[in-house]
Image (cartoon, rainbow, N blue to C red):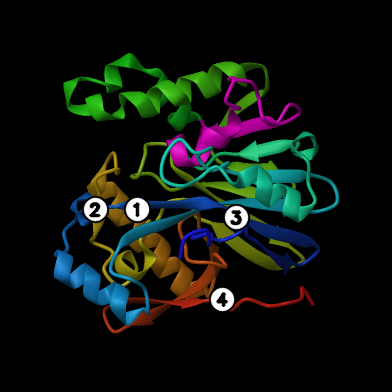
């Protein structure tokens, strides 16, 4: 099939939430070996993926989310700018959504891994979002900034750290660190530690409707939601990441809370239900209109 594109076009998905519009912006995807997944066997993981109608590949979509409420134009995460995987489509997706980088006034960061902050920097190292304030949890900033956290056991994380430090420096004049609470009208940062020390979600509320943009609570939803004990090699504190995941899944099921995630299958929104002693996901179906 020479000449036929083998990747999807820049993808967006809009959804109304009260008076707010939230748009998924797909940046690309990443493929990994199942060696990155712990506490579940490869046959078990492949069975779960096949049961969900997916190929038995550790493939992770990478998304960012745009929040427009008429007052602020906010981005949650920024993709990886082709630093890894087949990413780097964020700006194309923004163009499809009708938004220019200079219109983004705030970037909310869930955590400082490459596939979440790589899109903040242009190839020449300049700011991609010239007017944006960047917000992240204070503990996330502290973790990546402290040399003491990167001894021999974390050597593989040094390239990730190098990018985080560049982002912190380039956006230094407009970087705001917080410990929780409302970061913008209608948007609350919720600490969700484990994957990284300052890993956070953002709960967006408008007219009584809410969504939790939960960052990397799961990377492989069809595996980690029914089997929350499955952790990834990327988790800084795997036991805490599992405990946080279980807590969030329980809450999402109890509250029938709408979830958005950076690695969920398109269109990136779902709800959680209890399934015997574990959980199951109920993906939101694509809709051709917002009303």
Q: Position of residue 173 (x, y in %)?
A: 67, 17
Mark before the other along the chain sequence, 4 or 3: 3
Q: Which residue is mark 4?
A: 284
Residue receiving disc 1: 31
Labels 2 and 4: the sequence-earlier one: 2
Q: Residues within 10 Å of mark 2 (few under 14, many from 20)?
A: few
In reply to whether residue 214 is colored magenta, the answer given is no
Q: 254 and 35: which one is in front?
A: 35
Q: Gap in Å between the C-alphas at discs 2 and 3?
A: 32 Å
Magenta residues, start to end? 112-137
Q: Are marks 1 and 4 in contact (CB under 8 Å)?
A: no
- In the picture as drawn, the residue positioned furthest to the front comes out as 2
Label 2 with label 4: CB-CB less than 8 Å: no
Residue 134 visible? The answer is yes
Give the structural element (helix, strand or loop) at label 4. loop
Q: CA distance from mark 4 to mark 3?
A: 18 Å
The residue sitting at 50% across, 39% down in the picture is 80
- Residue that numbered label 2 is attached to: 33
- Looking at the picture, tell me which residue is in the foreground, 111 or 57: 57
Pick the quarter of the image with the N terminus. bottom left
Q: Is residue 169 left or right of residue 39?
A: right
């Amino acid at each position: 099939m020479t000449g036929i594109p083998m990747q999807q076009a820049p993808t967006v998905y809009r959804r109304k939430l009260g008076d707010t519009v939230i748009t998924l912006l797909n940046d690309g995807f990443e493929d990994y070996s199942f060696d990155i997944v712990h506490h579940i066997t490869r046959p078990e993981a492949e069975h779960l993926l096949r049961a969900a109608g997916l190929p038995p590949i550790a493939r992770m979509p990478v998304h960012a989310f745009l929040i427009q409420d008429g007052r602020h134009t906010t981005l949650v995460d920024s993709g990886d700018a082709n630093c890894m995987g087949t990413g780097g489509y964020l700006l194309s997706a923004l163009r499809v959504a009708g938004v220019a980088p200079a219109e983004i006034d705030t970037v909310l960061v869930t955590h400082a891994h490459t596939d979440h902050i790589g899109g903040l920097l242009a190839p020449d190292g300049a700011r991609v979002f010239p007017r944006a304030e960047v917000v992240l949890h204070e503990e996330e900033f502290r973790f990546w900034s402290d040399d003491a956290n990167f001894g021999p056991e974390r050597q593989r994380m040094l390239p990730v750290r190098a990018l985080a430090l560049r982002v912190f420096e380039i956006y230094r004049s407009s970087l705001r660190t917080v410990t929780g609470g409302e970061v913008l009208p209608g948007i609350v940062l919720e600490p969700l530690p484990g994957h990284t020390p300052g890993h956070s979600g953002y709960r967006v509320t408008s007219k009584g409707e809410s969504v939790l943009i939960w960052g990397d609570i799961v990377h492989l939803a069809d595996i980690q939601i029914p089997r929350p004990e499955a952790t990834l090699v990327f988790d800084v504190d795997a036991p805490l990441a599992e405990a946080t995941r279980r807590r969030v899944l329980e809450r999402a099921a109890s509250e029938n809370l709408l979830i958005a995630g950076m690695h969920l299958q398109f269109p990136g929104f779902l709800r959680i239900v209890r399934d015997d002693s574990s959980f199951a996901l109920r993906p939101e179906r694509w809709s051709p209109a917002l009303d």
